[in-house]
Amino acid sequence: MSEIMRVDGDLERLFRDVFTDWRDARAEASLRLSVDRGLWRTLEELGLTRLTSGEEAAAGWVEAAALLRAAARAAAPVPLAEHDLLAGWLLGRAGLPDPGELRTSCVLDPEGSAEQVPWAASADAIAVIWGEPGAWKLADVPASAAVIEPSHDLAGQQRDTVRVAVESLTGAAIGDDVVREYLLRGALARTVQITGAMDRVVELCLQHASERRQFGRPITRFQAVQHLIAEAASECALAMAATDAAVLEAASPHPDLDALEFAVATARSVTGHAASVVVRNAHQVHGAIGTTYEHQLHEFTKPALAWRSEFGSMHEWDARLTALIVGSSGPAWDSVVPASGMPKSRADD
């Protein structure tokens, strides 16, 4: 957790202990993942599946981000972002009841379909958005009422195709701002998860390099290995800082969506490029063993790469950030070039 975003120490320890205990007791990792219902029940009993949504919500984005990072550091297959930050938030904004079943969410196309819906095959219900700008609707659809075609992403996580007969639904009207914020929340949640996975990858690099010996000494003594790990650690730290800044923007009681979009675009761009460096360097440090199924490295590198293509690809977020800066004379532009048009010098700080 970076210095600009702190969570209560006892709460952080709870997050860490829950996922450490789960990982120590879990069965062998699988190439095809579904929601771990045992872990989900534990999280429910602790009140961690509804940190930010529902009548009993007792926390906000900062705590939710810490929980997401802890889950990503453990490669835990649970839909915390989808259930709480997305589906639960949507139902609350639309004034719809939320009975508490495990949920995911998606935006349907005009034919009532959505691809790559996270954890749909394991969900009890799906919060679906459909329509067009100025005429969006939201409905809470039981999973049994949808046609779900199971599939998986690069990391083996459930990313399913969902089809719903929208003509039979009577949804609640929601505004364009709700849909926009929903997409930004999803993009930010994925960025938080990527930083959690990258943080664990850097730890694994340090651990492996300290234990692996060549020519009678740990490979951490070799300058080339030191550079690989240092570069990965610095990229991870940069991504953490950008992501934490976006989380703090989202944590505002009434976030300005333009400012939030700029913060999320920055975090997505920085984190997407950082993931390339961290994953590449980690596999160079680990060598052949890092490519094996038995080694845990792939449980973190593959999700990091898969998550950065959700809620907008790295290329799309790079383009969006460029457009926001080049086309802006407001806060986005001022964050890069001050009003004078001249770069700030250190003497100005």
Image (cartoon, rainbow, N blue to C red):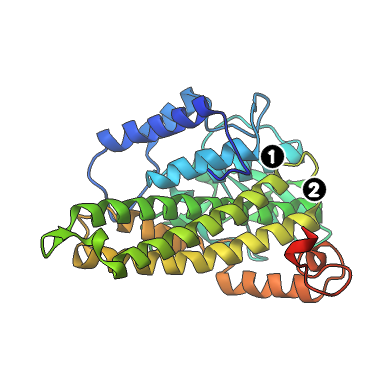
In x, y percent, where is residue 280? 37, 69
Q: Secondary structure at mark 2?
A: strand
In x, y percent, where is residue 28? 22, 45
Q: Which residue is mark 2?
A: 173
Q: Is residue 162 left or right of residue 38?
A: right
Amino acid type of disc 1?
Leu
In x, y percent, where is residue 153? 41, 62
Is residue 13 something one can see in this rendering?
yes
Q: Answer with the quarter of the image where residue 111 lies.
A: bottom right
In x, y percent, where is residue 41? 42, 28
Question: Taking 305 as reference, is 53 above or below it?
Answer: above
Exactly how many numbered labels are in the figure? Answer: 2
Q: Is residue 290 left or right of residue 60?
A: left
Q: Nearer the viewer, residue 245 or 113?
A: 245
Residue lying at 44% horizontally and 42% vertically, measured from the top left: 71
Residue lying at 83% horizontally and 62% vertically, measured from the top left: 331
Q: Which residue is mark 1?
A: 91
In this rendering, which labeled residue sits more in front, label 1 or label 2?
A: 1
Residue lying at 69% horizontally and 43% vertically, measured from the top left: 90
Q: Nearer the viewer, residue 64 or 159?
A: 64
Q: Answer with the quarter of the image where residue 94 lies.
A: top right
Q: Quick one: label 1 or label 2, which is nearer the N terminus?
A: 1
Amino acid type of disc 2?
Ala
Q: Is residue 52 left or right of residue 301?
A: right
Residue lying at 89% horizontally and 71% vertically, measured from the top left: 340
